Image: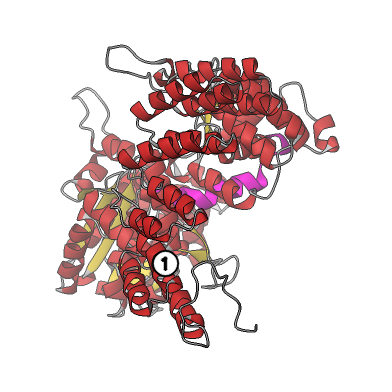
């Protein structure tokens, strides 16, 4: 392919024009009579177009013949213009300055909409950019074209791995130097490229995004590859930068070397791609994740949300998440009523504590009350099948709104396990997973909504995981769906959830049904929950069996819960057994429980034994000890020791309890001394400044 801007005379332009027409006729295997039939031109006009010494064909004739012969229309019309005496075209090459392009117009996927004051409500947004290894290869190519060379790079990666965004970021230095960018797409990508590649001028970026639409065209794909190759090797055309993107399956198809007996439909494309491909990974590596976190910490909300979802999934697929999010949200907003109801049931299930894998039978049974009566009455018999098929269709990043999944088998080390550690049995039948982006959307937009009755019924009927059932029971109770809370709690207990067992035991305890409460608590203990020991000790004490209550309490202590001693001490105090309460509180203090000395100190305060109270507060604690200087400061304040109170208050502040300083200093200043100069009695209540 010759460059028409090198300068043709009228005669040479006409000769070149007829040479191209003859070549097209031979390549297509058509006859001139076929051209007459296809173009509607007369036999004379068609014959003269090919005849040496004949008149110059018209521009309209060239347009019709080029279409029939699958030749570049723009190139033939340019030759016709010169041959007719119009002279070479003075119009600039294709494209426009890079700065006039919007990245979304170049098919960079938006990652969301600006809703945080950074733009109009529906303005498309891009997150901050995180450079990776392939970006350095792009940067090197840009440096080479800035020095006068021509380069081509093809970024190869799966859907939504950041290929097009990387190309956009790479050309920004060229935008500052006035480079143009041309994105051929009209009438088709391949035809637009073939028509105008010969017109590309120096300092132009040729943007062949989704290169399979150019090189994979069955009619002209090989010609496009040849035209790109001509552009790259023609010094008079450069410098130019050709940037393309491809999925791996297309790159493999185009670079495949056929066997000797096979056709070779992509020979020119294969030669063009050789040495020019750059792999783009699916995941962010550790360095890229660190850079992304830094941008998120600086206020990039889109990246922060994507990183949070990636942590839940346990992968580094950040770009896929960002690219697929808006498309997923659009699918949710425009889905059919039944599909939307399935998504909303899945959103409610996830936000209320159901696991990642949602049973199909549960979701299907939950749908009815999410639908308006009109939509419900219009459902066909196969509505569920259609809705699941609709939601399985993928968007960018190979994500689907609701995707069927196969849970991985659970593997545990051999050995005995307590019932509490046994994993729940997997759900029978198909299970589905809601897209993370939609899960987060539901968490934000539906948190004030209560699921309808069909949701609770489906959960009670079909869910079997005890922890999920207990979470739903709590959710129902907090939303005043008390009957559903009761039934879901019982179902959770029937499936072995210890929290549900303890809760039901507490209800029976309030009703003074000691035997039933004890039976439920012993089930929880058998399943390995030490919290039930404390509750059972309380039940036995209320039933009059103090010895058994203490035995159970010491079992709880031996399992790492010294607070059980204080709990039993409190119960003994309620029964007026103050000596027993004192004994257990001292046992707890001796075992290092941080609140035990405080409990004893409070008792000494009620007995007005101030010195012993202060001594107890001075005992060291293993942890959580900031309250002691605080209380000692108050003790010194009450005793009129202003210096001691200030010193202890500052000590508490150094330990992280700075909020006590203003109150103590104010009270010391206002009420530290009585009018006659005597210290304020420790038991005197403080009065407000207005009094």
- For the residue pair 304 and 563, the one nearer the viewer reads as 563
Q: Is residue 464 left or right of residue 657?
A: right
- For the residue pair 47 and 577, the one nearer the viewer reads as 577
Q: Mark 1 points at which residue?
A: 635
Which residue is rendered at x = 39% and y = 26% of the image? 554
Q: In which quarter of the image is residue 457?
A: top right
Which residue is rendered at x = 58% and y = 71% of the image? 120
Image coordinates of residue 106 in percent, x first then y, are 43, 61
CA neighbours of label 1 inside 10 A, class few (<14), some (14 to 19), many (20+)? many
Residue 83 visible at all: yes
**Magenta highlight range:** 320-338
Q: Is mark 1 on a helix, strand or loop?
A: helix
Image coordinates of residue 676 in percent, x first then y, are 51, 87
Magenta stretch mostly in which secondary structure?
helix
Image coordinates of residue 179 in percent, x first then y, are 30, 75
How did the renderer colour the structure? secondary structure
Image coordinates of residue 173 in percent, x first then y, are 26, 74
Q: In which quarter of the image is residue 337?
A: top right
Whether residue 327 is in magenta: the answer is yes
Q: Quadrant of residue 383?
A: top right
Which residue is rendered at x = 41% and y = 57% of the image? 304
Whether residue 106 is in magenta: the answer is no
Q: Quadrant of the C terminus?
A: bottom right
Q: Is residue 413 left or right of residue 534?
A: left
Residue 680 lies, with reference to residue 575, above or below; the image says below
């Amino acid at each position: 392919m010759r460059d028409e801007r090198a300068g043709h005379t009228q005669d040479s332009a006409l000769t070149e024009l007829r040479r191209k027409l003859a070549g097209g006729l031979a390549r297509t295997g058509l006859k001139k009579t076929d051209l007459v039939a296809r173009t509607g031109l007369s036999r004379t006009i068609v014959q003269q177009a090919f005849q040496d010494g004949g008149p110059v064909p018209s521009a309209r004739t060239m347009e019709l013949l080029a279409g029939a012969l699958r030749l570049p229309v723009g190139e033939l019309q340019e030759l016709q213009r010169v041959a007719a005496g119009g002279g070479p075209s003075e119009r600039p090459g294709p494209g426009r300055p890079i700065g006039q392009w919007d990245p979304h117009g170049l098919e960079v996927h938006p990652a969301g909409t600006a809703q945080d004051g950074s733009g109009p409500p529906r303005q498309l947004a891009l997150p901050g950019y995180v450079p990776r290894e392939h970006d350095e290869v792009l940067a090197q190519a840009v440096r080479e074209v800035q020095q006068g060379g021509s380069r081509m790079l093809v970024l190869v990666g799966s859907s939504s791995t950041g290929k097009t965004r990387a190309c956009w970021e790479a050309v920004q230095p060229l935008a500052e130097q006035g480079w143009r960018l041309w994105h051929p797409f009209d009438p088709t990508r391949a035809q637009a490229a073939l028509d105008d590649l010969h017109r590309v001028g120096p300092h132009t970026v040729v943007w062949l995004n989704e290169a399979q639409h150019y090189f994979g065209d069955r009619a002209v794909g090989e010609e496009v590859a040849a035209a790109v190759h001509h552009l790259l090797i023609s010094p008079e055309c450069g410098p130019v930068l050709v940037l393309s993107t491809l999925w791996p399956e297309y790159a493999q198809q185009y670079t495949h070397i056929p066997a000797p007996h096979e056709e070779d439909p992509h020979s020119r494309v294969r030669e063009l791609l050789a040495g020019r491909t750059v792999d783009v990974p699916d995941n962010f590596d550790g360095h890229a994740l660190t850079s992304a976190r830094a941008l998120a910490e600086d206020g990039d909300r889109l990246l922060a949300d994507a990183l949070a979802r990636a942590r839940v999934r346990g992968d580094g697929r950040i770009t896929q998440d960002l690219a697929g999010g808006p498309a997923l949200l659009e699918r949710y907003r425009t889905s059919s009523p039944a599909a939307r109801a399935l998504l909303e049931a899945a959103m409610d299930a996830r936000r209320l504590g159901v696991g990642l894998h949602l049973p199909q039978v549960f979701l299907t049974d939950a749908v009815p009350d999410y639908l308006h009566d009109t939509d419900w009455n219009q459902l066909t018999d196969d509505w569920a099948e259609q809705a699941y098929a609709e939601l399985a269709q993928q968007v960018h990043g190979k994500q689907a709104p609701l995707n069927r999944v196969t849970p991985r088998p659970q593997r545990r080390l051999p050995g005995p396990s307590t019932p509490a550690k046994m994993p729940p049995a997997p759900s029978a039948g198909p299970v589905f997973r809601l897209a993370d982006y939609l899960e987060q959307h539901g968490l934000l937009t539906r948190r004030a909504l209560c699921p309808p009755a069909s949701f609770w019924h489906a959960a009670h009927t079909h869910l079997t995981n005890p922890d999920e059932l207990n979470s739903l029971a709590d959710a129902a109770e907090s939303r005043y769906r008390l009957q559903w809370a009761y039934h879901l709690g019982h179902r959770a207990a029937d499936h072995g959830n210890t929290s549900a067992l303890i809760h039901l035991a507490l209800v029976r305890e309030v009703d003074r049904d000691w035997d039933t409460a004890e039976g439920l608590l012993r089930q929880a203990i058998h399943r390995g929950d030490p919290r039930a020991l404390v509750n059972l000790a309380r039940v036995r004490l209320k039933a009059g069996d103090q010895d058994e209550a203490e035995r159970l309490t010491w079992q709880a202590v031996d399992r790492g819960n010294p607070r059980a001693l204080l709990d039993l001490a409190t119960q003994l105090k309620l029964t007026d057994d103050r000596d027993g309460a004192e004994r257990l509180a001292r046992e707890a203090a001796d075992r290092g429980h941080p609140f035990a000395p405080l409990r004893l100190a409070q008792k000494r305060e009620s007995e007005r034994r101030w010195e012993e109270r202060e001594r107890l507060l001075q005992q060291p604690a293993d942890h959580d000890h900031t309250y002691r200087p605080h209380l000692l400061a108050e003790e010194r304040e009450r005793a009129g020791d202003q210096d001691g109170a200030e010193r202890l208050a500052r000590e508490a502040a150094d330990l992280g309890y700075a909020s006590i300083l203003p109150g103590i200093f104010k009270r010391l200043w206002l009420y530290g001394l009585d009018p006659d100069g005597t210290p304020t009695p420790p038991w005197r209540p403080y009065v407000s400044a207005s009094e």
